[in-house]
Amino acid sequence: MDPHVVAEGRLPLALLAGQGFALLPAAEVRPWLLAHGSLADWESFAASWEGMEPDRYMADGGRYRRRRHAVFTAQPGAALIRQPPRPHYQTTTYNPLNGGVERWFEPMPQAVAQSASLGTILAACRALFEELSGCRAWTAELHQFRIEARQAEAGKPTPEGMHRDGVDWVLVLMVRRRNIVSGTTTIHDLDRRQLGSFTLADPLDAAIVDDRRVYHGVTPVEAADPSQPALRDVLVATFRAS
């Protein structure tokens, strides 16, 4: 990647357009985000992952995932507007494990939805995806995920395995990682050949994928020290042209 592109707060459009994904360290993500707003409240934003309710829709019986959800929409030239709570739905084509049902997750608190950090992330994603696709009307779904690893149970960031989400673009942004081993993001083409891999290890490490062109997945995580809490917090933002 050209360092001047990063310094100006722009991500590699040619890379994303060419291969359909980018796996980016925080040093490259931060200037991109800051070109679109502020991360001044990042610490309180990251702390909002505490106290989330368990995901009650795990068909594998796992108790390792906590989750919150919010939906935003935008018309051309207008701001992204939060919508009333609605279920998250994926067909079994995209999610053979947990798809086919309406899943009602704990709503993202309004203080989080209105935070400077989340507004910056949304603005940066929207600008990037509009430049890549030309689309200006969007439905964006935001997911706060916490994956916990326990002594007797590994955590599965993507229990459905290698998958697509049934949207246009996906951002996976690392928020916090504590006492965790593994959790490697892998990208595959539509013939399921691996194209790249990257471990989101530091806050603001990110994966951005063109969901129409590639699959993505994350390997299970285990506790480095089973006697201590082990967690992986990420924000997933999906954008679908509307």
Image: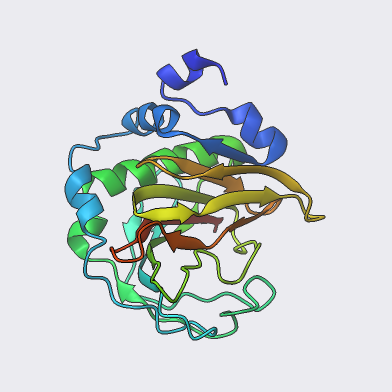
Q: Residue, x 38% and y 40% (percent of image)? A: 204
User: How does the figure colour the protein chain or chains?
Assistant: rainbow
| Res. 232 visible in picture | yes
How many numbered circles are shown? 0
| Res. 135 visible in picture | no
Using the image as rendered, state which of residue 30 and residue 233 is in the foreground: 233
Location of residue 5 in the rendering, given as x and y in whole percent from the top left corner: 50, 18
Q: Residue furthest right?
A: 191
Location of residue 236 in the rendering, given as x and y in whole percent from the top left corner: 44, 56
- From the image, which quarter does the N terminus lie in? top right
Location of residue 188 in the rendering, given as x and y in whole percent from the top left corner: 71, 51
Q: Is residue 83 above or below residue 134?
A: below
Q: Is residue 126 above or below residue 191?
A: above
Quadrant of residue 142 in the image? bottom left
Q: Residue, x 22% and y 51% (percent of image)? A: 45
Using the image as rendered, state which of residue 130 and residue 17 is in the foreground: 17
- Classify residue 161 as left or right of residue 195: left
Using the image as rendered, state which of residue 220 and residue 176 is in the foreground: 220
Q: Residue, x 64% and y 61% (percent of image)? A: 164
